[in-house]
Image (cartoon, rainbow, N blue to C red):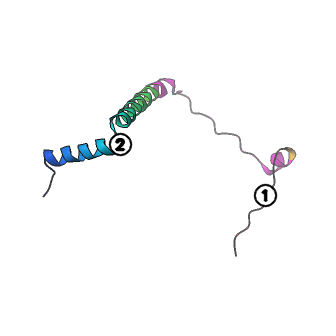
């Protein structure tokens, strides 16, 4: 009762193929392969592009600076009662 036999897995595979179809499963497989390849390439590029010096923190927006900008919308948050 612990693990499934090969026959259980074959039945599950047949049911999945009947539900999704081979074309859809092939598309899912190729999309997954491209995603994994892109992730690996990104990890490789990310480690090579990492700077040795620490990145300075982003500048904080103060209330005075936000009031001076014309595109700023002032909104007051209220709690529900």
- Secondary structure under tag 2 reads helix
* Magenta stretch contains residue 44: no
Dot label at residue 55? none
Question: Magenta part of the protein: which range?
Answer: 45-67
Mark 1 neighbour class, 10 Å CA radius: few under 14, some 14 to 19, many 20 or more = few
- Secondary structure under tag 1 reads loop
Tell which circle, 1 or 2, labels the residue nearer the N-terminal end. 2
Give residue 52's position: percent from left, percent from top: 52, 27
Label 2 sits on residue? 20
* Magenta stretch contains residue 63: yes
Label 1 sits on residue? 75
- Please tell me which residue lies in front, 18 or 51: 18
Identity of the residue furthest to the bottom in this view: 81
Left or right of residue 51: residue 56? right
Left or right of residue 21: residue 74? right
Give residue 79's position: percent from left, percent from top: 70, 69
Say above or below: 5 vs 77: above
Say above or below: 58 vs 5: above
Give residue 55's position: percent from left, percent from top: 59, 33
Say above or below: 77 vs 29: below
Give residue 27's position: percent from left, percent from top: 39, 33
- Report the residue at 46% width, 28% height from top: 42
Left or right of residue 25: residue 51? right
* Quarter of the rendering occupied by the C terminus: bottom right
């Amino acid at each position: 009762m612990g693990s499934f036999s090969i026959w259980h897995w074959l039945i599950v595979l047949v049911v999945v193929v009947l539900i999704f179809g081979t074309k859809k499963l092939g598309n899912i497989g190729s999309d997954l392969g491209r995603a994994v390849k892109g992730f690996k390439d990104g990890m490789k590029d990310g480690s090579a592009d990492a700077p040795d010096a620490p990145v300075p923190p982003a500048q904080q927006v103060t209330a005075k600076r936000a009031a001076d900008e014309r595109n700023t919308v002032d909104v007051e948050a209220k709690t529900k009662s």
